[in-house]
Amino acid sequence: MKILEGKVAFVTGAARGQGRCHALTLARAGADIIALDLAESIDTVPFPGATKDELAETVRDIEALGQRALSIQADVRSQTQLDDAVSRAITEFGNIDILIANAGIWGLAPFWEITDSEWDNMIDINLSGVWRSTKAVTPHMIERGSGVIIMTSSINGMEPCMNYAHYVAAKHGVLGLMKNVALELAPHGIRCNAVCPGAVDTVMLNWQGAYDLFAGHEGGTRDDFVRAGHSFHALKDVGMLDPQVVADATLWLVSDQAAVITGVALPIEAGHMLLTGSSDPS
Ligand SMILES: NC(=O)c1ccc[n+]([C@@H]2O[C@H](COP(=O)([O-])OP(=O)(O)OC[C@H]3O[C@@H](n4cnc5c(N)ncnc54)[C@H](O)[C@@H]3O)[C@@H](O)[C@H]2O)c1
């Protein structure tokens, strides 16, 4: 029997990247999947958003694994849309056992140049969106007396980085939210944990600004980015992380093998935070 046989998982940001990988990994383990994504670009985000075709591809891939999939185009900035999505999921699949609150955005600017709308969108999606997604599934999980919630934070939930204070603030906030949710839902038999990935090779990091950041100069390339992955992570032969390593750790966290683990922030970063780094005196 597969370890998630008979379970239903609700995954936000499922059209591509880590969200798609979570969806397919949970489906391979026997879960049916609600795949939710905005599937549109956002004007304050400097790289393209996922598309409707990508969301449809996630659903096709889940079905090809023999699991049921429900595709929902919705925005984690809207409580109404998330509540509707949860109602539809319960009507069609009967219940929700797992939430992976993964949808997120990124952007780059010194904190004093971040605009109000860039700041607001970042917090609205990366922090409030996680709260809203959790809020939407919680009454149902309380009623059933069980459930598992995973919130996607980041190593930037634990450490700062130059030029994206809004992202760092949101991801730190996710860890505070995770601990409070874990505390409040523990008496109901519901677990809540966070994953904190290092640098993952997805669209979020594959655009010119990200290449420049990792190269340490303008005109950075994909090759610079790939090379930088090796100095960013401490473990031998580990470069930019494949989304699969995040999904594999998450699969363990949602499974019964982690049945007494709650309120934990799990770094998935090949020893990145062991590195002390240095500052440029120039
Ligand atoms: N890539 C990294 O290095 C890295 C590292 C640590 C944490 N993370 C986090 O992992 C998560 C997944 O990111 P990824 O690397 O797969 O990037 P990605 O850009 O490939 O995927 C993000 C997904 O979220 C969706 N999304 C964005 N805004 C949304 C909204 N308002 N409503 C619904 N869906 C929305 C996008 O359409 C996209 O499909 C994010 O929370 C990100 O912050 C990424």
Image: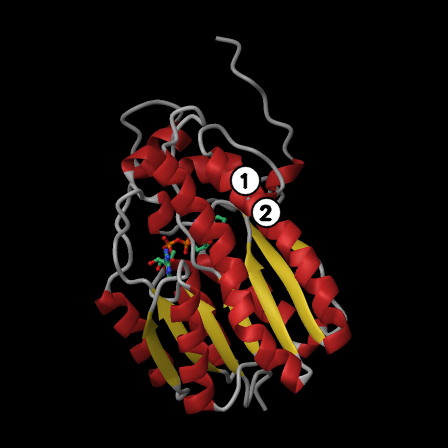
Q: Residue furthest front?
A: 80
Pick the front one: 47 or 218: 47
* Image position of 224 (left or right of 157): left
Residue that appears at 71% across and 60% down:
263
Q: Position of residue 1 (x, y in %)?
A: 59, 91
The label number, if any, that marks residue 279 in the structure image: none
Q: Residue furthest left?
A: 53
Q: Residues within 10 Å of mark 1 (few under 14, many from 20)?
A: many
User: Is 206 above or below relative to 282?
Assistant: below
Residue that appears at 59% across and 77% down:
139
Q: Position of residue 260 (x, y in %)?
A: 77, 71
Location of mark 2 (residue):
173
Q: Mark 1 and 2 residues: CB-CB less than 8 Å, in contact?
A: yes
User: Is 61 above or below relative to 113?
Assistant: below
User: Is 151 above or below relative to 153?
Assistant: below
Helix, strand, or loop for circle 1?
Answer: helix
Tally of marks: 2
Between the C-alphas of marks 1 and 2, the distance is 6 Å
Q: Residues within 10 Å of mark 2 (few under 14, many from 20)?
A: some
Is residue 244 something that shows in the picture? yes
Location of mark 1 (residue):
169
User: Mark 1 is on which residue type?
Assistant: Ala
Pick the front one: 56 or 182: 182
Res 189 → quadrant: bottom right
